Each structure stands twice: as C-alpha cells, then as structure tokens.
Amino acid sequence: MNKELTALEHNGTWELTSLPPHKKAIESRWIYKVKYNSNGTFKWYKARLVAKGYNQLPRLDYTANFSPVAKTGTIRLFLALASAKEWAIHQLDINNANLHGFIDEELYMKPPEGYDKAQPGQFLALLVYVDDVLVTGVDENNIIDVKRYLHTSFTIKDMGHAHYFLGVEIARSSDGLFLSQRKYILDILHDAGMLNAKIKEFPMSKSLKLDDTGPLIADPEKYRRIVGRLLYLNLTRPDISFSVQHLSQFLHQPRQQHWDALMALLRYLKGTPAKGLFFPSKTELQLRAYCDADWATCSMTRKSVTGYCIFFGSSLISWKTKKQATVSKSSAEAEYRSMATTVCELQWLSYLLRDLQISLHLPIPLMCDNKAAVHISENPVFHERTKHIDIDCHIVRQQVLNKFISTSHIGAKTQLADLFTKCLNSSLFHQFLSKMGLVSLSPS
C-alpha cells in the first residue's frame, strides 16, 4: 500500500484542495490481490487504490473509459511468429497503468536522438493487454534497452523471459513454444468441486441435443460463472470451442440438462488438464484456412453454426464457433456465410502480419467441403441465384478476384473446421486435435 501511494504521488496523480461548491466527490477503496506463479506458489502482494467509478454517470461525470486489449488471435499470432523466428520473448508489467491516460490535444515533438539513424532489421514488437506487456524482436539487446526506457517513464516489473502471461503458461524449447492453461483448469475444477470426478473421453456426446425444456437449476449464477471461465479457456483449447458455444446459449435460464452437459465437459477437462497448443519453431510463414457450417443445426431457431480455423504455418492461431445471425435456406448458403466470416478474419490477420513486417504469399488457401459454395465463389454465373446472400457473395468473390484467397474443395474426413461445428466420433476427434497441434507437454 505504501508503494502504491508513493507511485501515485510520484506521478502527480492529485493535489489536495477544498471541494468547490456544487461539486461532488466520489469515494475510493483499496483492492488487494495475491499474485501466484504458474505452479501455484506465492509471487507477490498487490494493492491498488481505486475510485468508485460505478457512482459516476456516463456523459455527465466522464465520457469514455478504455484500456488497450489485444485480441486472443493476435496473442497467438504474436507468439507463433516469435517461435518461428526464434526471437526472445520478454514480459513486463506496467506499474499504475491506470494513471497513464491519453490527451485530447494535438501535439508535435522532435524524434529522439538516434531515431532517424535506426539500424535496418532491428525490428521489435510489443503486445499490450491493459498493463501486461510482451516484447519480442530480432535483437534481445534492443528488448532490454526498451524495458530500461519504459522503466524510466512508467516504472515496471521486469519479469524476464515470458513464462506466465494472462493465465497462460509458456514453455519454450529449441523445438518451439508450448501454451497451456493447466493451472487455470485446475482452479475451475477445484471451484466446481470436480477434482475427484470421473474422467470423460469427449467434451460433449455426439447424440446430445440441448433445448430450452426441463427443470431450471437452483443456482443459475454458478452455471454462468463456470461457462464464463470456460470462454476464456478457449484461448488455448480449441477442442472445447463447440461445446462452450453450445452451453453459452442457455445462460439466461440454465436447466438441469445444461448443467449435466457442463459437468460432463468438466470431466473431460479433468482428464486433459495438461493439453495445450504447440507452436513449432521450424514452420512456414504462410496462412491457410478451413471453414465449415452445420446447416440448420439449432432445433429451436434452425440457424446454422459457423466454424473456422486458421493456421500460420503449422501453428493454429485463430478459430471460431458461432451461431449465424440469420436462417440459411440451403447448406450452400450456410457454408458461404461461413466463408465470408473466415475471409474477414484472414484480412485482419494479413493487416497484422504486414505491421509485423511479414510478407504473405498470396493467394491464401481456403478449404471448404461444400462444392456448391466453392463454385459460387469462383463462378459469377451462380450469383444470379444467390441475391439473398448478396453481401457475403461479394466479400468472398471480390477476394478471389483479387487473388487474396483461393478456394478449394476437400473431403469431410480432412475438414478440420468440422471440430468447431459439431460433435465428432472418436477417431476424427483425436485425429483433428493432433493436426491442430493440441498436445500434452506432460502426462495428464
């Protein structure tokens, strides 16, 4: 607490004064937290003095409140690139990050000495998630220099090489980078009282069909809390993406059948806590994508489910399971909407890679297991029959013409995106997981 107060004074956060007439003062409070290492051992105590902002009224007491937060796909791409390039990855934490805001005025400044004489090839990147920062680059000496400079401006905690970031355990070897959330999974199981539960082989039974019937559960908040934590677990566990998406549809009124399915998912995690993503160091710096849709799969709304997965070389960096916003009249239409969603994500990743100074080889392969959807993307004659999906048609078709993507048909047994749209049988489930680089670093 003394360190917090000293930092607040050092940054000139406030000055003591009398409260002017017709002004109100909001109260403050201390927030305490204990930080742990990835193995559960004590790291340090943390105290923060915060204002009770929930007493303020928007547009009256404040206009905006924003902290920079990187997308999960950006985090995975950042780490996969550092692994492929064999760059060092350092981690730091900004002290009193809430004190360093933005100003509205337009300012001009001279570049610091040496900026216009920068050495070619000395690329360096910072990934910011509120006050947690990862730094990587070609030269580790540059990383150390940047951390030293940031410490003079903000005061930071230098954590050295990255090992535990946002609850993700990072293990590195000459073969590549391994990401897992083992401690996070064990915490979820402990809080749910499932540490001694029987192990289940799959996240969700293939024959299970959930709907909005049956008795309501007595503690809906517990259901919502567990599902919310599982959504964050999706950062390194693509194998539960479809199951969590399915369960999250019933947060408003969870019923006994939903609770039973949630407990079955936790039993699957009980048997696989050490599973995580592996990003190999020897890989191509090229994107490839798979997209799929399960047509009219929702028995309540008859909406389809979109699923895609995107690889950077051999590293799985982006995936999604999401129910489509509208009802599709055919399987081809559902697949085409899935293609359009995937193309938008590919465009975002291409912009990000350009900022990271990585040149992409175009067109990017986009695999789909629906021949009609592939034909629509390649043949403009089909567009006369698909005016009701006109926007999606133009998004995909335009990128085919621009040679940004090239669509191709693949068989169902090689469609990796199937994992994100439906429950699979045993052989396909484990086969797809191995192809996605989801492995166990140690016996689970």
Image: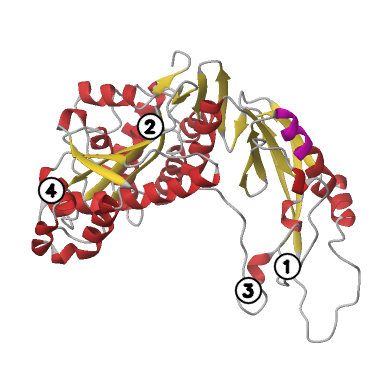
Question: Mark 3 or mark 4: which comes first in sequence?
Answer: 3
Disc 1 to disc 4, how far (Cα)? 51 Å
Mark 2 residue crowding within 10 angstroms, few (<14) / some (14–19) / many (20+): many
Specify which label sits upstream in the sequence, 3 or 1: 3
Left or right of 358, for residue 324: left
- Residue 308 shows in this picture: yes
Tell me what residue is drawn at x 52 percent, y 33 percent.
81
Q: Magenta part of the protein: which range?
A: 140-146
| Residue picked out by circle 4 | 375
Q: Position of residue 412 (x, y in %)?
A: 15, 32
Relative to 68, 98 lies left or right:
right
Under mark 1, the amino acid is: Ile
At x 24%, y 60%, the residue is: 394
For label 1, the residue is 103
Inter-mark Cα distance, 1 to 2: 46 Å
Q: Nearer the viewer, residue 426 or 436?
A: 436
Residue 112 percent location from the top left of the image: 81, 51
Q: Secondary structure at mark 1?
A: loop
Q: Which residue is mark 2?
A: 266
Left or right of 107, for residue 207: left
Q: Amino acid at mark 4?
A: His
Q: Mark 4 or 2 closer to N-term?
A: 2
Instruction: Single out the mark in the foreground, 1 or 2.
Output: 1
Q: Earlier in the sequence, mark 1 or mark 4?
A: 1
